Image (cartoon, rainbow, N blue to C red):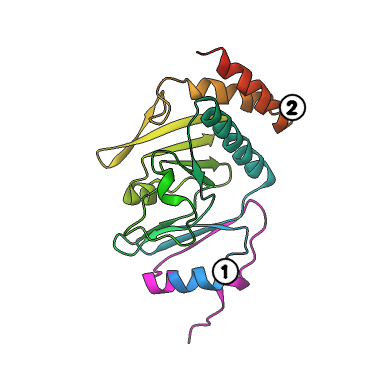
Amino acid sequence: MPVKIAIAQIQLNEGQRVILENINWQEFEDILEDLGEHRHSLIAYYKGVLELRMPLPEHERAKVLISHLLVVLLEELGLEWESLGSSTFKSKKIQAGIEPDDCFYIQNYRSMIGKKRLDLDVDPLPDLAIEVDLTSITQINTYEALAVPEIWRYKNGKLEISLFVNGKYVNSPVSKAFPTIDAIAGISLMLEKSKDLPISALRREFRQWLQTQS
Protein backbone atom coordinates (compact mmCIF):
# COMPACT_ATOMS: atom_id res chain seq x y z
CA MET A 1 0.00 0.00 0.00
CA PRO A 2 1.55 3.36 -1.02
CA VAL A 3 2.52 5.81 1.71
CA LYS A 4 0.91 9.23 1.41
CA ILE A 5 2.50 12.33 2.91
CA ALA A 6 1.47 15.98 2.94
CA ILE A 7 3.26 17.95 0.23
CA ALA A 8 4.17 20.57 2.84
CA GLN A 9 6.40 17.95 4.48
CA ILE A 10 8.77 18.09 1.50
CA GLN A 11 11.58 20.40 2.53
CA LEU A 12 13.55 22.00 -0.31
CA ASN A 13 16.88 23.67 0.28
CA GLU A 14 17.93 26.77 -1.66
CA GLY A 15 18.59 25.90 -5.28
CA GLN A 16 16.78 22.56 -5.15
CA ARG A 17 13.75 21.42 -7.11
CA VAL A 18 11.48 18.39 -7.16
CA ILE A 19 9.33 17.05 -10.00
CA LEU A 20 6.14 15.07 -9.36
CA GLU A 21 4.43 13.18 -12.18
CA ASN A 22 0.89 11.90 -12.73
CA ILE A 23 -0.65 14.69 -10.67
CA ASN A 24 -4.24 15.32 -11.72
CA TRP A 25 -5.89 18.73 -11.53
CA GLN A 26 -7.65 18.14 -8.22
CA GLU A 27 -4.41 16.89 -6.69
CA PHE A 28 -2.69 20.02 -8.00
CA GLU A 29 -5.34 22.19 -6.37
CA ASP A 30 -4.99 20.23 -3.12
CA ILE A 31 -1.19 20.65 -3.23
CA LEU A 32 -1.54 24.42 -3.65
CA GLU A 33 -3.85 24.51 -0.65
CA ASP A 34 -1.50 22.31 1.37
CA LEU A 35 1.49 24.50 0.54
CA GLY A 36 -0.39 27.64 1.46
CA GLU A 37 0.44 31.21 0.51
CA HIS A 38 3.24 31.75 3.03
CA ARG A 39 6.02 29.86 1.29
CA HIS A 40 9.17 30.56 -0.68
CA SER A 41 8.99 27.76 -3.25
CA LEU A 42 7.53 28.37 -6.73
CA ILE A 43 5.49 25.96 -8.84
CA ALA A 44 4.95 25.09 -12.49
CA TYR A 45 2.31 22.59 -13.62
CA TYR A 46 1.47 21.27 -17.08
CA LYS A 47 -0.63 18.23 -17.98
CA GLY A 48 0.10 16.16 -14.89
CA VAL A 49 3.71 17.19 -14.23
CA LEU A 50 4.36 19.44 -11.23
CA GLU A 51 7.66 21.13 -10.46
CA LEU A 52 8.48 22.84 -7.18
CA ARG A 53 11.65 24.91 -6.94
CA MET A 54 13.39 26.84 -4.18
CA PRO A 55 15.34 29.87 -5.43
CA LEU A 56 18.88 30.78 -4.44
CA PRO A 57 19.71 34.24 -3.03
CA GLU A 58 21.55 34.91 -6.32
CA HIS A 59 18.29 34.15 -8.15
CA GLU A 60 16.30 36.48 -5.92
CA ARG A 61 18.71 39.39 -6.29
CA ALA A 62 18.69 39.10 -10.09
CA LYS A 63 14.89 38.95 -10.09
CA VAL A 64 14.56 41.99 -7.85
CA LEU A 65 17.11 43.95 -9.89
CA ILE A 66 15.40 43.25 -13.22
CA SER A 67 12.02 44.12 -11.71
CA HIS A 68 13.37 47.40 -10.31
CA LEU A 69 14.92 48.30 -13.66
CA LEU A 70 11.64 47.53 -15.41
CA VAL A 71 9.85 49.89 -13.01
CA VAL A 72 12.40 52.63 -13.77
CA LEU A 73 11.75 52.07 -17.49
CA LEU A 74 7.99 52.33 -16.96
CA GLU A 75 8.43 55.52 -14.96
CA GLU A 76 10.69 57.12 -17.58
CA LEU A 77 8.14 56.33 -20.30
CA GLY A 78 5.29 57.63 -18.15
CA LEU A 79 3.41 54.33 -18.26
CA GLU A 80 0.99 53.06 -15.61
CA TRP A 81 1.42 49.51 -14.37
CA GLU A 82 0.44 46.87 -11.82
CA SER A 83 2.39 43.85 -10.59
CA LEU A 84 1.11 40.62 -9.08
CA GLY A 85 4.58 39.28 -8.31
CA SER A 86 4.66 35.47 -8.12
CA SER A 87 0.89 34.96 -8.05
CA THR A 88 -0.41 31.59 -9.25
CA PHE A 89 -1.80 31.73 -12.79
CA LYS A 90 -3.71 28.54 -13.48
CA SER A 91 -6.32 27.23 -15.87
CA LYS A 92 -8.18 23.95 -15.41
CA LYS A 93 -9.32 24.13 -19.04
CA ILE A 94 -5.76 23.81 -20.37
CA GLN A 95 -4.34 21.93 -17.35
CA ALA A 96 -1.58 24.45 -16.72
CA GLY A 97 -0.35 26.61 -13.86
CA ILE A 98 2.69 28.83 -13.29
CA GLU A 99 4.13 31.16 -10.67
CA PRO A 100 6.50 33.59 -12.42
CA ASP A 101 9.41 35.17 -10.61
CA ASP A 102 7.59 38.44 -11.22
CA CYS A 103 4.98 39.76 -13.62
CA PHE A 104 3.68 43.09 -14.84
CA TYR A 105 0.41 44.37 -16.24
CA ILE A 106 0.96 47.33 -18.54
CA GLN A 107 -1.68 47.35 -21.25
CA ASN A 108 -4.18 45.69 -18.89
CA TYR A 109 -3.16 47.36 -15.63
CA ARG A 110 -6.62 48.81 -15.00
CA SER A 111 -8.13 45.32 -14.76
CA MET A 112 -5.83 44.38 -11.87
CA ILE A 113 -6.18 47.38 -9.57
CA GLY A 114 -7.39 46.09 -6.19
CA LYS A 115 -7.50 42.50 -7.46
CA LYS A 116 -7.75 39.95 -4.61
CA ARG A 117 -8.37 36.71 -6.52
CA LEU A 118 -7.33 35.54 -9.98
CA ASP A 119 -9.67 33.78 -12.40
CA LEU A 120 -8.20 33.33 -15.88
CA ASP A 121 -11.67 32.69 -17.26
CA VAL A 122 -12.32 36.41 -16.82
CA ASP A 123 -8.99 38.05 -15.85
CA PRO A 124 -6.25 38.87 -18.37
CA LEU A 125 -2.79 37.34 -18.22
CA PRO A 126 0.15 39.60 -17.34
CA ASP A 127 1.60 41.47 -20.30
CA LEU A 128 5.13 40.57 -19.25
CA ALA A 129 6.64 37.88 -17.01
CA ILE A 130 10.17 37.78 -15.57
CA GLU A 131 12.02 34.50 -15.08
CA VAL A 132 15.53 33.88 -13.75
CA ASP A 133 17.06 30.56 -14.81
CA LEU A 134 19.89 29.53 -12.49
CA THR A 135 19.20 26.11 -10.98
CA SER A 136 16.13 25.35 -13.09
CA ILE A 137 14.83 26.13 -16.57
CA THR A 138 11.67 28.14 -17.22
CA GLN A 139 8.76 25.84 -18.05
CA ILE A 140 8.14 27.29 -21.50
CA ASN A 141 5.47 24.71 -22.37
CA THR A 142 3.38 25.99 -19.45
CA TYR A 143 3.77 29.59 -20.59
CA GLU A 144 2.88 28.57 -24.14
CA ALA A 145 -0.26 26.83 -22.92
CA LEU A 146 -1.29 29.97 -21.02
CA ALA A 147 -0.14 32.31 -23.85
CA VAL A 148 1.59 35.01 -21.78
CA PRO A 149 2.53 37.66 -24.40
CA GLU A 150 6.13 38.31 -23.34
CA ILE A 151 8.82 36.75 -21.12
CA TRP A 152 12.07 38.32 -19.96
CA ARG A 153 14.49 35.50 -19.09
CA TYR A 154 17.83 35.94 -17.36
CA LYS A 155 20.10 32.97 -17.97
CA ASN A 156 23.82 32.39 -18.47
CA GLY A 157 24.45 35.97 -17.39
CA LYS A 158 22.30 37.44 -20.18
CA LEU A 159 18.80 38.81 -20.61
CA GLU A 160 16.62 37.32 -23.36
CA ILE A 161 13.27 38.60 -24.55
CA SER A 162 10.79 36.04 -25.87
CA LEU A 163 7.52 36.99 -27.57
CA PHE A 164 4.52 34.68 -27.99
CA VAL A 165 3.95 34.32 -31.74
CA ASN A 166 1.65 31.76 -33.38
CA GLY A 167 1.58 29.47 -30.35
CA LYS A 168 5.34 29.53 -29.69
CA TYR A 169 7.94 31.79 -28.09
CA VAL A 170 10.51 33.37 -30.35
CA ASN A 171 13.52 35.40 -29.26
CA SER A 172 13.27 39.08 -30.08
CA PRO A 173 15.86 41.89 -30.02
CA VAL A 174 13.22 44.29 -28.67
CA SER A 175 10.34 44.17 -26.23
CA LYS A 176 6.76 44.23 -27.45
CA ALA A 177 5.93 46.49 -24.50
CA PHE A 178 8.84 48.88 -25.17
CA PRO A 179 9.68 48.64 -28.89
CA THR A 180 11.66 51.91 -29.00
CA ILE A 181 14.08 50.99 -26.18
CA ASP A 182 17.02 48.58 -26.39
CA ALA A 183 16.05 47.01 -23.08
CA ILE A 184 18.40 44.05 -23.54
CA ALA A 185 21.45 46.30 -23.88
CA GLY A 186 20.54 48.58 -20.98
CA ILE A 187 19.50 45.92 -18.50
CA SER A 188 22.38 43.62 -19.46
CA LEU A 189 24.77 46.48 -18.74
CA MET A 190 23.26 46.94 -15.27
CA LEU A 191 23.35 43.19 -14.62
CA GLU A 192 27.06 43.20 -15.41
CA LYS A 193 27.61 46.14 -13.06
CA SER A 194 25.57 44.41 -10.33
CA LYS A 195 28.70 42.48 -9.33
CA ASP A 196 30.05 45.68 -7.82
CA LEU A 197 27.12 48.03 -7.21
CA PRO A 198 23.97 47.94 -5.03
CA ILE A 199 20.53 47.91 -6.60
CA SER A 200 19.92 51.51 -5.48
CA ALA A 201 22.92 52.75 -7.48
CA LEU A 202 21.96 50.60 -10.48
CA ARG A 203 18.51 52.16 -10.55
CA ARG A 204 20.07 55.61 -10.79
CA GLU A 205 22.54 54.55 -13.48
CA PHE A 206 19.82 52.88 -15.51
CA ARG A 207 17.66 56.01 -15.34
CA GLN A 208 20.60 58.06 -16.59
CA TRP A 209 21.21 55.52 -19.37
CA LEU A 210 17.56 55.71 -20.46
CA GLN A 211 17.70 59.49 -20.63
CA THR A 212 20.55 59.24 -23.16
CA GLN A 213 18.45 57.02 -25.43
CA SER A 214 15.83 59.60 -26.33
- Which picture quadrant has residue 10? bottom right
Residue 199 rendering spot, x and y as whole percentages: 70, 32
Which secondary structure class fits the magenta region best? loop
The magenta stretch spans residue 127: no
Residue underneath mark 1: 36
* Residue kind at label 1, given as amino acid type: Gly
Label 1: how many Cα within 10 Å (few below 14, some 14–19, many 20+): few
**Residue at 52 percent of width and 20 percent of height:** 185
**Residue at 40 percent of width and 23 percent of height:** 179
Q: Is residue 37 above or below residue 26?
A: above
Secondary structure found at label 2: loop
Q: Nearer the viewer, residue 148 or 21?
A: 148
- Which picture quadrant has residue 176? top left
Residue 58 rendering spot, x and y as whole percentages: 67, 41
Q: Is residue 92 visible?
A: yes
Residue that sits furthest to the left in the current view = 166
- Which picture quadrant has residue 72? top right
Q: Is residue 182 above or below residue 35?
A: above
**Residue at 65 percent of width and 66 percent of height:** 11
Residue 21 rendering spot, x and y as whole percentages: 42, 65
Secondary structure found at label 1: loop
* Residue kind at label 2, given as amino acid type: Leu
Q: Which residues are magenta?
A: 1-28
The magenta stretch spans residue 20: yes
Residue underneath mark 2: 197
Q: Nearer the viewer, residue 100 or 119?
A: 119
